[in-house]
Image (cartoon, rainbow, N blue to C red):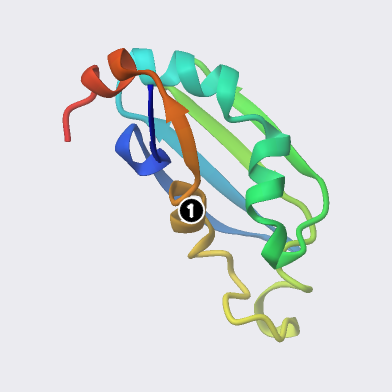
């Protein structure tokens, strides 16, 4: 087990959804996706993103493509031109989630190609 960032086993894309943002986390292998389905909960993401004062976080799974999609409700302070936040469109939220550190099993780390 190695404590390391999520970026070792996943990629992410993010953007605005009205007053919230979405973060799609794409696993780099089937083993990584299986691990993420267990370890990367909505609560873990909400706690990690607490600095942006997000409300609830909802998680959706797309098993056919190995993606977990998180909706960070009320994370944009109104969104677009209505917000005073630095990133009013949530473009950096994916990178922020990839900085989350998890205890990742060595066999999962070995399953990904970087």
How many numbered tags mark residues here?
1
Of 2 and 95, the residue lying toward us: 2
- Choose top left, top right, bottom left or bottom right for residue 38: top right
Looking at the image, residue 74 lies above or below residue 104: below
Residue 13 place in picture, x, y as percent: 44, 49
Farthest-out residue, left? 113
Residue 62 place in picture, x, y as percent: 53, 22
Can residue 22 be seen here? The reply is yes
Residue 11 place in picture, x, y as percent: 36, 41
Q: Secondary structure at mark 1?
A: helix
Identify the image quadrant of the C terminus: top left
Can residue 64 be seen here? The reply is no
Residue at image mark 1: 94
Looking at the image, residue 55 lies above or below residue 61: below
- Choose top left, top right, bottom left or bottom right for residue 27: top left
Looking at the image, residue 5 lies above or below residue 60: below
Residue at 63% from the left image edge and 40% from the top image edge: 70
Residue at 46% from the left image edge and 13% from the top image edge: 34
Looking at the image, residue 47 lies above or below residue 86: above
Mark 1 Cα shell of 10 Å, populated few (<14), some (14-19), many (≥20): many
Would residue 85 be found to the left or right of residue 108 on screen? right
Residue 5 place in picture, x, y as percent: 40, 43
Of 96 and 13, the residue lying toward us: 96
- Choose top left, top right, bottom left or bottom right for residue 1: top left
Residue at 29% from the left image edge and 13% from the top image edge: 107
Would residue 58 be found to the left or right of residue 12 on screen? right
Residue at 73% from the left image edge and 62% from the top image edge: 75
């Amino acid at each position: 087990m190695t404590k390391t960032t999520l970026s070792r086993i996943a990629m992410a894309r993010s953007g605005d959804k009205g007053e919230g943002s979405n973060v799609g986390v794409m696993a780099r292998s089937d083993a990584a996706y299986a691990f993420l389905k267990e370890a990367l909960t909505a609560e873990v993401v909400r706690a990690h993103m607490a600095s942006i004062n997000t409300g609830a976080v909802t998680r959706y799974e797309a098993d056919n493509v190995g993606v977990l999609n998180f909706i960070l409700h009320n994370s944009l302070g109104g969104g677009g031109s209505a917000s005073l936040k630095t990133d009013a469109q949530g473009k950096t939220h994916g990178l922020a989630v990839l900085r989350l550190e998890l205890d990742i099993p060595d066999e999962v780390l070995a399953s990904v190609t970087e």
